[in-house]
Every structure is written in structure tokens, then in C-alpha cells.
Image: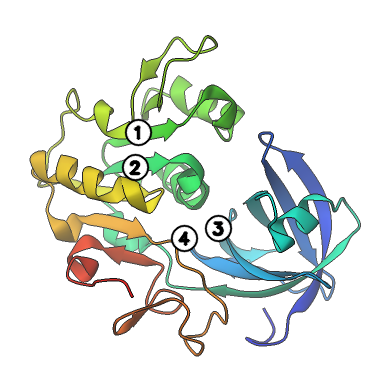
Amino acid sequence: MSGLYVPQIAAIERVEEETATEKTFTLRPLNGDRLSCVPGQFILLSVFGRGEAPFCVGTAGQDLPTLDITVRRYPGGRVTEALHSLGPGAYVGLRGPFGNGFKVEALRGRDLLFVAGGIGLIPVRPLIRQVLSERDQFGRLVLLFGARQPSEILYRRELDEWQAREDFEVQLTIDVPHPDWSGHVGVVTTLFPDLEVDPARTKAIIVGPPVMYPFVVAACREKGIGDADMIFSLERYMKCGVGKCGHCAMKHKYVCTDGPVFTYEEIREIEEH
């Protein structure tokens, strides 16, 4: 993509409603640029006259003509509310992609445990898609995904497809009982007690609300998974995207340039400002 500081113009090509508060937007650069994105990277999107905000890329690969992002609408959120009001044919600005993303090469040959909570499934989804497209390059695959209630479960159609596969173990849970739910009930860590893993082979990819992280770390450690084998994507307010403004600084690390993907070994001693 052209330039780090000046957005390029992109057209909204398609909008798909995922839940009552999330939509997926397909964006196509007007200048015909092809995009290259690594799972776990993010872009900065401008809604003209409203502002700019970071969003995880939902599409990974090389030489892509379009880019997907899934965005939650926050009440009072200037950018998210304005974006959700737009439809196909509207124009937005793009900068990026930024960040390091997930190092897929380091995952090859390993068992992968994906642990996602809520909209944490958004950055995990392109990684899962890439892994499934190269299925023979990886060992056992397990996804543990938790949402507050059934209506907040993202990508239901794709989750159903994943659950139907014999080479991918997908377990879903919601936080509290609901009349429309007959599956597991409890926060995502309540799926761990019955989970068997080979800790010497397993990499855990963990994305969700920050409050979830200490409990997932403890659950992974109980299974014998080491700190260097726990991989997180951190949520921070990223303003410039290039390590200049300091909004996302955690001591000597910048989430926008050093991350947003870190191993737990890299961040366990860092106290956030």
C-alpha cells in the first residue's frame, strides 16, 4: 500500500452483517493497488470527517485485490458508528497494513490451540484460514471460542463448517445459560479441564479481552504449555501506526510496531502505563 502517513482511498465493495453489532466490510483500493497482509496485522481506517481508528485485517495473503475488516459498532464511537452507517459505494481511507502479525513459519509442524473470546475471533480467523489451507503442514488443531451469548457469536456459518471437519476440533461456549443455547456454558477457560494436549508440541494462540488473559495463561501453564509457546495479540489504542505518537507504548515496546503479536515470554514482565 502506498505511503505510511497519507491514506489511500478505498471503496466499500460489500457489507455483511455478522451480528447486531458487528459488520464485515470488503474494501477495494481505488488506485488498483494489490494488498499483502499477514494474519494478525491491522490497518488504520478513516471515515472522512469523523476520524481514524485501527482494525484487524480479516484477509491474509499476497497480491490481494480487496481487504476485509470486521468492525464492532460502539455506542458513541465516532468512527465505528459512522462506518456502520455506510454501504457499498461509499469511500474510506486506508493506511497500512501495520504490525508484525503471526509468524506462521514458527507454527508449522506444531499442534495449535486457538483460544478466542468475543471479537478476539476476528484476528484469529485469517490465521485459522491460512492454517486450514495448508492443513498438512500442521499437527492437531483445536479452537476454544467463548461469547457472552448466542447472538454475539461471530462467523456462525464458518464455525459450522469448521465443526463439521474431522481434522479440526472446535468447542464453543457462552458465559451464562440462554434459552437458545444447548451447548457448553461457562467462560472459555471452563473448556480446559477436559482438554488433553501435548505441551512439547503445542503452541497456544490467545486473543480476547485483556481480562481473559491471566486466566488463560494459568490454564495453559496447568497443561504444561510454556510462556514462549503462548502467543497473544494485544489490544491497545494505536493512533499513528508507526511508533511515533506513543499512545500504544508499554515501557520500551510499541504495540503498533513491535506487535501487536507477542509471546507471553516477551510481555510477562511489562507493566502497562
Residue for point 48% across, 40% down: 118
Q: Secondary structure at mark 4?
A: loop
Q: Amino acid at mark 1?
A: Leu
- Name the disc covering residue 60, or none: 3
* Mark nearer the N terminus (2 vs 4): 4
Residue appearing at x 51%, y 26% in the figure = 149
As drawn, the residue found furthest toward the right would be 89
Secondary element at image label 2:
strand
Name, please, the residue furthest toward the bottom.
244
Q: Amino acid at mark 4?
A: Gly
- Categorize mark 4 by other alpha carbons within 10 Å: few (<14), some (14-19), many (20+): many
Measured from the top left, where is residue 65 in percent x and y? Answer: 73, 62
Q: Are marks 3 and 4 in contact (CB under 8 Å)?
A: no
The picture quadrant where one finds residue 175 is: top left
Disc 3 versus disc 4: nearer the observer: 4
What residue sits right under mark 2 in the picture? 114
Q: Which of the two discs, 3 and 1, sits closer to the camera?
A: 1
Residue 94 placement, left or right of 169: right
Q: Earlier in the sequence, mark 2 or mark 3?
A: 3
Q: Earlier in the sequence, mark 3 or mark 4?
A: 4
Circle 2 Cα neighbour tier, 10 Å, few/some/many (<14 / 14–19 / ≥20): many
Q: Are marks 3 and 1 in contact (CB under 8 Å)?
A: no
- Above/below status of 159 relative to 264: above
- How many residues crowd mark 3 within 10 Å: few (<14), some (14–19), many (20+)? many
Pick whichever of labels 2 and 1 is earlier in the sequence: 2
x and y percentages locating residue 141 in the rendered image: 32, 36
Picture quarter with the N terminus: bottom right
Mark number, residue 73: none
Tag 1 residue: 144
